Image (tube, rainbow, N blue to C red):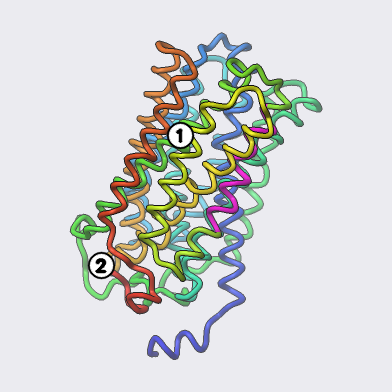
Amino acid sequence: MSASQEIKSWDTDYEWKVVLLLALGFGLVGLDRWILAPLYPFIAADLGLAEGDIGYLAGVLGIVWGLFAIFAGRLSDRIGHRKVLIPSIILFSLMSGFSGLAHSLTFLVVIRSLMGATEGAFCPTSFAATAAASKPERRGFNLGLQQSGFALFGFALAPMVATQLLTVVPSWREVFWVVAIPGFLVALLLYFVLRDPGNAPAAGLVGIEEAAPVKWMEALKSRNIIVCMMALICAMACVFVLGAMVPIYLMNVIRLSPQEMGIVTSAMGFGGFIGQFSWPGLSDKFGRKPLAIIGFLAAAVSVYWFSQIGADTTLLFVALFITSFFCLGNVALITGPIATESAPAGLVAASIGIVVGAGEIFGGGVAPAIAGFVANNFGLPSVLTVALTGVSIGVFVCLLLKETAPLRVGNRPATT
C-alpha cells in the first residue's frame, strides 16, 4: 500500500487511544519521579538528610534513566514496543511504592536508581509508539500531547497531590504507595490496546520498519541527532535543576509555607503541560528550528526573572510558568518530532533513546548533582545559575539544527 493510500485509510480510533494512554503513562512517570521533590523537606527531617541530597537523588535517577533509555530504545526496535512498555510501567510503579519503605539515603538511592532504569526504558519506546500511531500532519502535536502528561502530573499535580495527601495519610511513606496504584491500571489497558510497530499505522512513514539490517551506531551519523543530544542536555539541565531544587528553595530561602510552595511549584507543571503539546504542534506549521531557538531564549529570560523575585507568590508562579512553558516545550520538540524525523530508518526508538539518554545523563543527572553540590557549598540561591546557564547555551546549540518539519521537507523520514 502506498503512503497516500495508508493516510486515506487511517485508523484514527487507534491513534487517539494509544496517544492518550501513553500520555497518561508518561504522566505517571512524571508523578512517580517528581513526587519526591515536594515530599523531600519531610523526608529529610525524618531521615536526617542534607538540603543538597535531593540533587544527588534526582541526579542518580537521571543518569540511570539515560543509560537505560539508550539501550531500551534499540531493544524495542528489535523486539517490539509492547514487550518494553508494559513491563516497564509495572516495574516503575512498584519502585514508586517501595520508595515509601526508605530508612536511609542509601536505600533511596538504590530504589530511585531502579526507578530510573524502568522509566528510562519506557521513555523512548513510548515516543516511538506514539510516532508509529500518528498521522504525519499530527505527529508534532501528538508527540507533544503524549509528553505533556509528564509536566502535568509530575510538576503540576505532584506538589498538590503530595501536600494534600499528607493531610489524610499518616506520613510521607503512604503517599508513595497511593501514587503507585494508577500505573498498574494503565499497564492493563495498554495490554489490550497497544500494537507492535509492524501493525501500527505510521510505521513506514516514520521509518519504524527496517528496510534492511541497520547498525545501532548509524543513528550518530545524523547531524541533527548529535545537535538534539546537546540541545536536550541544555533544556534538561534547566528543567530538572528547577524541578529538584525549587521546592526546598521556596521553603528555606523565600520562606513560603508548604501550601504556598505547592502552588508556586505547580506552575512548572501547568506551564510545561501547555508548552509540551502546543509548542511541537506550532512547529508543525512554523518549523522546528525557529521555535527551538525562541524557546531557549524565552526560557533564559524567565529564569533570570525568577531569580530576582522575592516572596511574591503570584510573580513567582508566573515566572516559573513561563520558564516551564518554553523549556519543557523544547524538551518535547527535541525528543519528539525532531529526533523522530532525523532518525535513520529502523532506528527511530534507538535514536530517541540516544537523545534522551544524553539529556538524562548530563542534563537530568549530572546537572542536578552539580546543583546539589552548589547548594551545599555556596547556598541554595546559587542553584538558579546552573539552570540559567543551561538554557543560555541552548540558544546557540539550536542554531546548528536542520529543519525537519513534514510541511517543509515532505512526509519522508528525515535523516539529516
In this view, 272 is above or below 14? above
Q: Amino acid at mark 1?
A: Leu
Residue 256 visible in the picture: yes
Residue 375 in the image: state x and y as whole percent. 45, 16
Residue 364 in percent (x, y) is at 41, 36
- Quadrant for residue 15, please give it: bottom right
Please identify the quadrant where the C terminus is shown: bottom left
Q: Is residue 354 visible?
A: no
Q: Residue at x 44, y 50 (%)?
A: 295
Q: CA distance from mark 1 to mark 2?
A: 33 Å
Q: Which residue is mark 2?
A: 415
Residue at x 72% of width, y 28% of height:
163
Residue numbers of the magenta segment: 261-277
Q: Which residue is mark 1?
A: 114
Tell me if residue 218 comes above or below residue 407 in the rendering.
Answer: above
Residue 33 falls in image quadrant: top right
Q: Residue furthest right?
A: 168
154 or 406: nearer the viewer: 406
276 inside magenta stretch = yes
Q: Position of residue 50 (x, y in %)?
A: 51, 12
Cβ atoms at labels 1 and 2 below 8 Å apart: no
Disc 2 marks which amino acid?
Answer: Thr
Q: Residue 398 has which mark?
A: none
Rendered residue at 68%/29% (across/down): 313
Percent from the top left, x then y, of residue 180?
64, 39
Q: Main secondary structure of the magenta part?
A: helix
